[in-house]
C-alpha cells in the first residue's frame, strides 16, 4: 500500500492539504500534485476580505512555502492542466504534453465562477473572483474607483461590498432575487444582514432587472432593463459557481452537480476519490448527496480521504460550518439554515455583542446562524456544533438564555 502512487488533480486548498497530510501521516509512496494555477496551494477566503483591503498579501494565504513540497518529497506541478484521464491505463495526460501514472487518483478540481450571460460582461473592468490573480486585479481597480457594482448578493458578493466600503468606495449590490443570500439564509436573517449593510451605506438593489454593461474600452455603467444607467468604475460578479466535473464526467465517473462520492470520499470508480468544492459527497447525517463550498469542508474531506488511503476506514459526517466576515461583524452558520422550520434566538447583537439564531427541524436543534462583533460568538458556535453532532436536545429556555453558559449545557448533556 505505502509504495503506491497517488496523483491529485487540483492544487488548491483541498488538494494541497491532502498531499501534505498524506506525507505527514507516513505515506511513503509517490505524491504528484497537479494544478493549473501558477501559485502553490493557497486558501481563498481572504481574497474577498484581507487581500482587497490590503490587510493581507497573497503570500499570507499559502498553505506552506512552495519549497516545502519538494522538501517533503511531493512533486508539485504548477501551471499544469490535466486534459485527459485514461482510467483503464491509470494515466493522466496534461496540457503540456506529460503523461503521468497513478494507482490512486484524487479529484480536487474545485469550482469555476459562473459568468453573467449579459451584454458587456466581457468588458475590461467586469471581474469574476476565484483566484489570487482575480483578487489582485480587483484590488488594483479599487485603488482608483469611486463607485462599483457587485452583481449577486451571496456571501462573496456581500464580503466584497464590505471590503470596498471599508476603503470608502460607494457600493451597489444588484440582486435579481427578492432578497440577499437567499440560497443560504431564511428571510428574517437576510433582512437583518441587509440592515447591517445599509447601516454602512452599502446600497442593495433587490429584484434588480439588469440589461447589461456599457463602456468602450472599460466598463463605465450598469444598464437596467428600464433603460436607466448607474455609472460605475468596476463591476464584480459573484453569482455562484459550477463544480469542475468535466474531466470526471468524460472519464465516466458518476456526477450530479459534483462528482458523486460515498462518505469515504470514493467515487463510482475504486481508488478514485473526490474532495472539496468539486465533490457531492454522501452525508450520512443528512442522508443525501451534498456539495459543500467551504474552508472546513476542503480540510475535513482531505483528512477523511487521507485516512482511507492509509487504510483506516473513515466516514465524513460533518455538521457543515462556515464563516463570513463583513465589516466588523462575523456571520457563522452550522447546518443548512435555509431548511430550518422554526427559529429561536439567544441574545442580541445590540446588548450582547452577538446574537445566535437556533434553527429546529421536527423539533430538533440542527441549524445555527450567529451574527457577532468579530469573533465574539466563535466559542459558542463550537459548543453548538458539538451539541448538534451529539444530537443533544437541551432545554430551549436554557439554550435561549444568554446568562446560561452553553458549555454548562454541553456538560449536562454529557453527564
Ligand atoms: P480550489 O481551492 O478552488 O482548488 C481547485 C484547484 O484545482 C484550482 O486551483 C483549479 O485551478 C485547479 N484545477 C481545476 N481543474 C484542473 C485541471 N483539470 N487540472 C489542473 N488543475 C485543475 N469558505 C469559507 O468557509 N469561508 C469563507 O469566508 C470563504 N470565503 C471565500 C472567498 C472567496 C473569494 C472564495 C473564492 C471562496 C471562499 N470560501 C470560503 C470557499 C473556500 O475557499 C472553498 O470552498 C475552497 O477553496 C475549496 O477548495 P478546493 O480545493 O475544493 O477548490
Image (cartoon, rainbow, N blue to C red):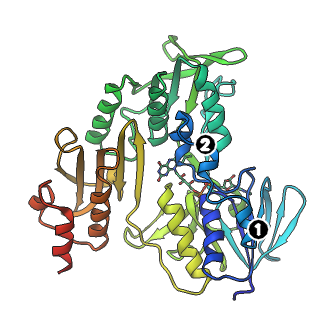
Q: Residue furthest left?
A: 397
Does the residue tagged 1 have its C-beta within 8 Å of any atom of ligand 1? no
Which sits earlier in the primary sequence, circle 2 or circle 1?
A: 2
Q: Secondary structure at mark 1?
A: helix
Q: Position of residue 2 (x, y in %)?
A: 70, 87
- Toward which corner of the image does residue 329 lie, by quadrant? top left
Residue 373 location, quadrant: top left
Q: Are marks 2 and 1 in contact (CB under 8 Å)?
A: no
Rendered location of residue 146, percent (x, y):
53, 17
Residue 193, can we see it? yes
Q: Residue furthest right?
A: 97
Q: Is residue 216 above or below residue 71?
A: above
Q: Residue at x 14, y 55 (%)?
A: 400
* Towards the viewer: 169 or 240: 169
Q: Is mark 2 within 8 Å of ligand 1?
A: no
Looking at the image, which residue is at 49% across and 21% down? 169
Q: Which quarter shows the N terminus?
A: bottom right
- Find residue 372 and report its image quarter: top left
Instruction: Residue 81: give x, y in percent of width and height.
Output: 78, 55
Q: Which residue is mark 1?
A: 70
Q: Residue at the location (70% across, 55% down)?
A: 40
Q: Element type at marker 2?
A: loop
Q: Is residue 261 visible?
A: no
Q: Which mark is residue 57?
A: 2
Amino acid at each position: 500500500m505505502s509504495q503506491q502512487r497517488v496523483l491529485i488533480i487540483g492544487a488548491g486548498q483541498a488538494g494541497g492539504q491532502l498531499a501534505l497530510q498524506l506525507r505527514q501521516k507516513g505515506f511513503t509512496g509517490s505524491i504528484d500534485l497537479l494544478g493549473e494555477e501558477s501559485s502553490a496551494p493557497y486558501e481563498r477566503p481572504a481574497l474577498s476580505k484581507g487581500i482587497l483591503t490590503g490587510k493581507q498579501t497573497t503570500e499570507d494565504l499559502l498553505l506552506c512555502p512552495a519549497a516545502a513540497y519538494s522538501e517533503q518529497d511531493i512533486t508539485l506541478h504548477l501551471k499544469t492542466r490535466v486534459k485527459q484521464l485514461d482510467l483503464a491505463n491509470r494515466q493522466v495526460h496534461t496540457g503540456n504534453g506529460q503523461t503521468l501514472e497513478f494507482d490512486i487518483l484524487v479529484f480536487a478540481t474545485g469550482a469555476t465562477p459562473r459568468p453573467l450571460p449579459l451584454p458587456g460582461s466581457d468588458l475590461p473592468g467586469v471581474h469574476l473572483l476565484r483566484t489570487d490573480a482575480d483578487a489582485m486585479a480587483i484590488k488594483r481597480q479599487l485603488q482608483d474607483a469611486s463607485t462599483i457594482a457587485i452583481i449577486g448578493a451571496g456571501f462573496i458578493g456581500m464580503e466584497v461590498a464590505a471590503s470596498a466600503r471599508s476603503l470608502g468606495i460607494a457600493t451597489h449590490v444588484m440582486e435579481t432575487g427578492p432578497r440577499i443570500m437567499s440560497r443560504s439564509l431564511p428571510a428574517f436573517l437576510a433582512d437583518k444582514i441587509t440592515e447591517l449593510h445599509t447601516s454602512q451605506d452599502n446600497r442593495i438593489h433587490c429584484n434588480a432587472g439588469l440589461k447589461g454593461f456599457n463602456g468602450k474600452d472599460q466598463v463605465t455603467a450598469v444598464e437596467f432593463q428600464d433603460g436607466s444607467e448607474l455609472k460605475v468604475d468596476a463591476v464584480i460578479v459573484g453569482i455562484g459557481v459550477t463544480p469542475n466535473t468535466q474531466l470526471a464526467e468524460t472519464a465516466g465517473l458518476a456526477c450530479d452537480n459534483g462528482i458523486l462520492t460515498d462518505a469515504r470520499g470514493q467515487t463510482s470508480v475504486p481508488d478514485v476519490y473526490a474532495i472539496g468544492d468539486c465533490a457531492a459527497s454522501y452525508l450520512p447525517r443528512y442522508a443525501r448527496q451534498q456539495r459543500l463550498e467551504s474552508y472546513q469542508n476542503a480540510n475535513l474531506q482531505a483528512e477523511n480521504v487521507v485516512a482511507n488511503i492509509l487504510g483506516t476506514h473513515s466516514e465524513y459526517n460533518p455538521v457543515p460550518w462556515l464563516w463570513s466576515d463583513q465589516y466588523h461583524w462575523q456571520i457563522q452558520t452550522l447546518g443548512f439554515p435555509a431548511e430550518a422550520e422554526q427559529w429561536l434566538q439567544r441574545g442580541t447583537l445590540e446588548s450582547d455583542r452577538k446574537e445566535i439564531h437556533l434553527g429546529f427541524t421536527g423539533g430538533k436543534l440542527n441549524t445555527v446562524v450567529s451574527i457577532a462583533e468579530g469573533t465574539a460568538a466563535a466559542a459558542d458556535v463550537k459548543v453548538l456544533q458539538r451539541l448538534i453532532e451529539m444530537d443533544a436536545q437541551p432545554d430551549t429556555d436554557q439554550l435561549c438564555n444568554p446568562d446560561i453558559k452553553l458549555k454548562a449545557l454541553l456538560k449536562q448533556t454529557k453527564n
